[in-house]
Amino acid sequence: MPSVPTGFQPFSAQEEASTCLEQLLEYEDRGLEELGDCCFVIPAGGLGERLGFSGVKFALTADLTSGCCVLAVYASYIKAFEALAQARRGKPCTLPLVIMASSDTETGIKELLERNNHFDLEPSQVSILLQEKVASLADSNATLAMEGPYQIATKPHGHGDVHFLLHSSGLVAKWQAEGRKWVLFFQDTNTLYLMTFLCTLGVSARHGLEVNFVAMPRCAKEAVGAITQLRHSDGRSIVVNVEYNQLEPLLKATGHPEGDVNGPDGLSPFPGNCNELLFSLPEYAAELQSSGGQLVEFINPKYADSSRTAFKSPTRLECMMQDYAKVLGPQARVSFTRYPLEFGYFPCKNDIATAARLASEGTPPHGAASSEAAVYHAFGTMLSLLGAKVAPAELRQWRGGPQLMGPAVVLWPDFAPCFAELRRKLGSSASSWNLAPGCSLEIQGQDIRIDALDLAGALKIRVVSGASLHIQGLRVQNKGHEFVALSEAEQSGEAPESLRIRGYRLVAHETKVIEVLEPGAFVLDLDGELKKV
């Protein structure tokens, strides 16, 4: 019998900032105590062909303002978390990163890491595990699909293989021997995951959660998995992810004739799964010793016709990493942490034509444009919650469908790895920040303080490690940046793939750049003079 589980909601973007931030910051502080004992795992076995990108998805440009790729963003957060943990504990900290690759992505991921000096991570802290493929099936009789007379066609087995590989590689046992306590699993094209990680970690630590699903608001029948409590007739219950195409028939078969419906707030009562999971390592290690990391498999064929015998294309057995919760006993503490939609699930996985079709149907497009807009909106929301005045988003029409786009704000992880750090750096000055419509703001650097900012245009601030910058007040008015739709020729091939999947390019008309490239303390005074103090 399905029902809505009880979880945790640290804050709501609709609450008063003073109300919503108090609990959030308490959870972040608790998470900071645990940060040095964390491990990070990313399944990344798929290429970007589905969205019209020929490389590995880690190489996708997360946003045009910074030009940073997805893996660089993830690595920057890990470096920022290491700095926070080191400051808290007073000793060096290295946080391991594991990437599960496939034969399709292994070479591309390794080349991306080597070409970029591992994005400043130590090569020894990054492990790549190789996922094997399984035989493909051609029809309902489980006839093996063939690529040639003597070669069986194969496909990936799903991201659930990550548990088996972590166990068989010995990494989980190694982490446990090192005294590590937490493992975060997330996927490869949503750079919002780590914005709220410290809070999620604090929720798990405070409430003793064995599995913590990160969730977001979800509309009824939306094509996103739902966090659901399933109760057996004997009273046993578990909290698991139920895929959207399974939730509807399950509800109808158990006394809910209308299935999944929206409540008075316009949302389904079942939270949406963001495919981000935080596990407690001791219990996880014990379960892997018992199960070997094997999960329940399923098959999801696409039938060619109503006879339901022939497949449109070969299918295979697969498993999902979130189904780990289904192998746990009823005593396991499994719950979820729900964040506002502004910090939800905005992956880049659909090509521009599919994104346009989904948008026209009122469904989240999950394309490159919506993924990029979500980055800007999330950072703008962080600033707004702390008291800054940020212009509202405006509707833009792209080839991938209509998209709300506000000020293009990118706060690098070394500047804002969490709400607490951003609040500390803004202090009481947040109310003196004003970001005008169409403006662009990029801030990179660990030790930056800005007393007042009035931005109508484009501003980029970069401060190297070992340097500090205090901006006493700054007013910027220039021609700024402009997002411009691609021409037919550009969309047809003249523009690079990273732009064609968006349908637009960024034109930097004019940018105010403030850089501190040497160690030391610097001040930008009210007259605009940069001085070393």
Image (cartoon, rainbow, N blue to C red):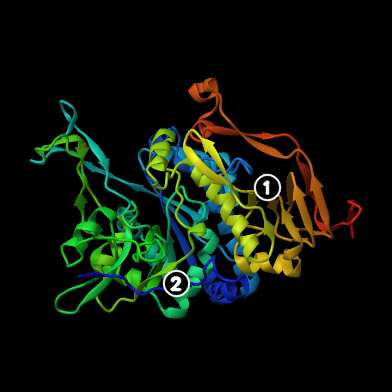
Dividing the image into 4 quarters, which one contains the C terminus?
Answer: bottom right
Of the pair 137 and 275, the residue shown nearer to us = 275
Residue contact between numbered discs 1 and 2, judged by CB atoms under 8 Å: no
N-terminal label among 1 and 2: 2
Q: From the viewer's perspective, is residue 52 above or below residue 210?
A: above
Is 320 on the left-hand or right-hand side of 483?
A: left
Instruction: Tell me where residue 293 sits by quadrant.
Output: bottom left
- What residue sits 24% from the left and 60% below the top? 259
Q: Residues within 10 Å of mark 2 (few under 14, many from 20)?
A: many
| Nearer the camera: disc 1 or disc 2 | 1
- Picture disc at residue 181: 2
Is 203 on the left-hand or right-hand side of 260?
A: right
Of the pair 36 and 388, the residue shown nearer to us = 388
Query: What residue occupies the far front of the structure in this picture?
Result: 264
Residue flagged by tag 2: what amino acid is it? Lys
Instruction: Tell me where residue 169 sits by quadrant.
Output: bottom left
- Picture disc at residue 234: none
Q: Does residue 465 appear anywhere in the picture?
A: no
Residue flagged by tag 1: what amino acid is it? Pro
Residue 40 in the image: x percent, y percent?
46, 59
Residue 299 in the image: x percent, y percent?
19, 48
Instruction: Tell me where residue 283 sits by quadrant.
Output: bottom left
Dot 1: element: loop
Q: Which residue is mark 1?
A: 437
Of the pair 451 and 77, the residue shown nearer to us = 451
Q: From the viewer's perspective, is residue 483 above or below residue 446?
A: above
- What residue sits 60% from the left and 69% below the top? 85
Residue 449 in the image: x percent, y percent?
77, 62
Q: Does residue 98 appear anywhere in the picture?
A: yes
- What residue sits 21% from the left and 54% below the top? 297
Give the Cα distance between marks 1 and 2: 44 Å
Q: Residues within 10 Å of mark 1 (few under 14, many from 20)?
A: some
